[in-house]
Image (tube, rainbow, N blue to C red):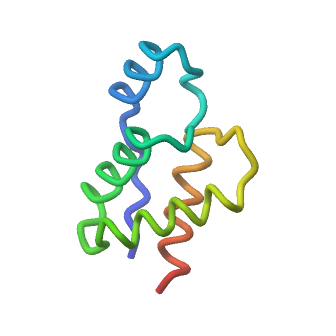
Amino acid sequence: MVAMNTICWKEFDRKKQIEGGDVRYFSFNEWEIDFLVEKIRETNPEYSEIRILRAILSCCETIPAPHPKNEFYEYVLQKLINFN
């Protein structure tokens, strides 16, 4: 069962602001993907990094940009459930 806890976005927001990006959105870049994989693994250690990455990639292909970060996070979690 996927834990759907809300994650803390402070670290994400801080780095996004430094880069001059919009903190409301998830972009398809390496550090943001790594951040999301790490946060999902913290609450869902039963899923491998590869499986989480596959869910993220699938969502990036399915959801048109820009990706609102909270909605995107929830969508990725739903993908993990559907991969079962």
Q: Is residue 26 above or below residue 64?
A: above
Q: Is residue 15 above or below residue 9?
A: above
Residue at the far front in the pictured view: 30
Q: Is residue 22 above or below residue 77?
A: above
**Residue under the point 29% across and 71% down:** 48
Closest to the observer: 14 or 43? 14
The picture quadrant where one finds residue 35 is: top left
Residue 84: x and y in percent read: 47, 86
Residue 58: x and y in percent read: 59, 66
Number of marks in picture: 0
**Residue under the point 71% across and 61% down:** 62
**Residue under the point 47% across and 69% down:** 54
The picture quadrant where one finds residue 60 is: bottom right
In the image, is 60 to the left or to the right of 12? right
Residue 78: x and y in percent read: 55, 68
In the image, is 38 to the left or to the right of 59? left
The picture quadrant where one finds residue 67 is: top right
Residue 75: x and y in percent read: 59, 59
**Residue under the point 53% across and 13% down:** 20
Please identify the quadrant where the N terminus is shown. Answer: bottom left
Residue at the far bottom in the pictured view: 84
In the image, is 84 to the left or to the right of 31? right
